[in-house]
Image (tube, grey):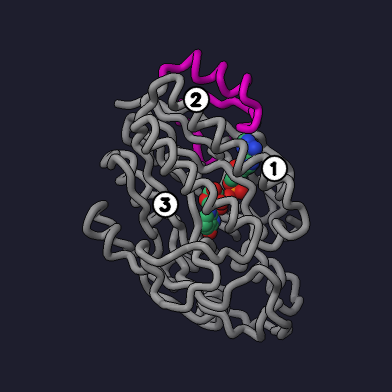
Amino acid sequence: MSKILVTGGAGFIGSHVAKKLLEKGDEVVIVDNLNDYYSVKLKQSRLDNLLERLKFTFYQVDIADYPAMEAIFEKHKLDKICHLAAQAGVRHSLKDPFVYERSNNLGTLNLLELCKKYKVNNFIYASSSSIYGLNKQLPFSEEAKVDTPISIYAASKRYNELLAHTYHHLYGIHCTGLRFFTVYGPWGRPDMALFLFIKSITKNQPIKMFNSGEMSRDFTYIDDIVDGVVASIEKNYPYEIFNLGRGETQKLGTYVEALEKSLGVKAQKNNLPMQQGDVVATSADISKAKKMLGFNPKISIAEGVDRFVSWYKTYSDELGLADM
Ligand SMILES: NC(=O)c1ccc[n+]([C@@H]2O[C@H](COP(=O)([O-])OP(=O)(O)OC[C@H]3O[C@@H](n4cnc5c(N)ncnc54)[C@H](O)[C@@H]3O)[C@@H](O)[C@H]2O)c1
């Protein structure tokens, strides 16, 4: 049993990771500032419902607040850090870049400084497929050069990777960065495509198809991501970066079709131009994660979308999901 700090534990990925760790017997301390970038009710409900009956410690604290974070490191003798808190969202980063500077850059610096000071030698953190930026060589490999980000969000995630490398080099802290590829599933984020689509479809409104739907993504189901995160925590490699994706790129249209099939409704579509900051395609080379983490994504798009729809129907009224 380990004592693990999960930052962003009221978030989509963080809450699922916390659940898995608690179920396997680890002690979990969650830090999340419960900011209102999207529904606080959804974040609170993840803690209340998804983590129902599981015993964890929760702090509503901003990771950019060094003294508050230090108090947590001081109180809990942490073995491992699973750092998933961040200001997410490619498009939002063009509107409010400063929140990325504070949460993603300063927040991560604080955590690494505290790892150094409190001798925590296992730091797993979220990076993103968006750091591949203008890379044209698909599938994206961890070996590729990643110096062409095209959003402030992507640049902040790349900064996190560079900072992790620096702390590993200087102080020997074990750091593993995980480049997640478009994660979806129950308790997902209301600002992401699947959630936006289901809201529009159920309200009989057209869904927005950016770049006229000519986009491809390596859509990855949440449980598969959680397996990759937990394996990374357990392996505790000295310094690695892994792609965590399904390893199978799909057109946006395929994703929409899976949703239409699951709902039994045909979506109306509104074709729109490409949005600034977005990349046309992502595709993960997951051979390294397969070999070193035993990563083996299992959930197909059809199955994953069905599970999401079923969750959405269950909680739609209670949480007012359609209005998020
Ligand atoms: N979901 C995806 O497809 C995806 C893809 C690539 C990378 N990521 C990364 O994975 C991680 C988790 O993403 P998610 O989809 O669960 O997002 P999320 O927004 O649901 O979760 C992030 C959580 O962090 C919290 N948070 C934000 N700023 C904070 C701060 N300063 N202090 C404390 N808490 C703060 C938020 O309240 C939120 O609950 C993030 O680092 C994100 O950038 C996600």
Disc 2 from disc 3: Cα separation: 20 Å
Front in this rendered view, residue 145 or 48: 145
Q: From this viewpoint, is residue 121 visible?
A: yes
Residue 178 shows which numbered tag?
3
* 1 sits to left or right of 54: left
As displayed, is residue 286 above or below residue 159? below
- Kindly report which numbered mark, 2 or 3, lies closer to the viewer in this rendering: 2
For mark 2, what is the residue?
114
- Kindly report which numbered mark, 2 or 1, lies closer to the viewer in this rendering: 2
Return the x and y of residue 76 as percentages of the image width and height.
46, 17
Amino acid type assigned to the residue bearing label 2 in the image? Leu
**Pointer 3 or 1: first along the chain:** 1
Query: SS at mark 3?
Result: strand
Residue 84 shows which numbered tag?
none
* 257 sits to left or right of 164: right
Q: Does 248 lie within the magenta span?
A: no
The local crowd at label 2, few if under 14, some if 14 to 19, many if 20 or more residues have their Cα within 10 Å, is some
Amino acid type assigned to the residue bearing label 3 in the image? Leu
Mark 2 CB lies closer than 8 A to ligand 1: no
Residue at position x 66%, y 34% in the image: 33
Residue at position x 33%, y 40% in the image: 233
For mark 1, what is the residue?
41
Q: Quadrant of residue 171?
A: top left
The residues colored magenta run: 48-77
Return the x and y of residue 215 as percentages of the image width and height.
56, 80
Front in this rendered view, residue 145 or 24: 145
Q: Does 67 lie within the magenta span?
A: yes
Disc 2 from disc 1: Cα separation: 30 Å
Return the x and y of residue 228 as percentages of the image width and height.
35, 51
Question: Quarter of the image containing the C terminus?
Answer: bottom right
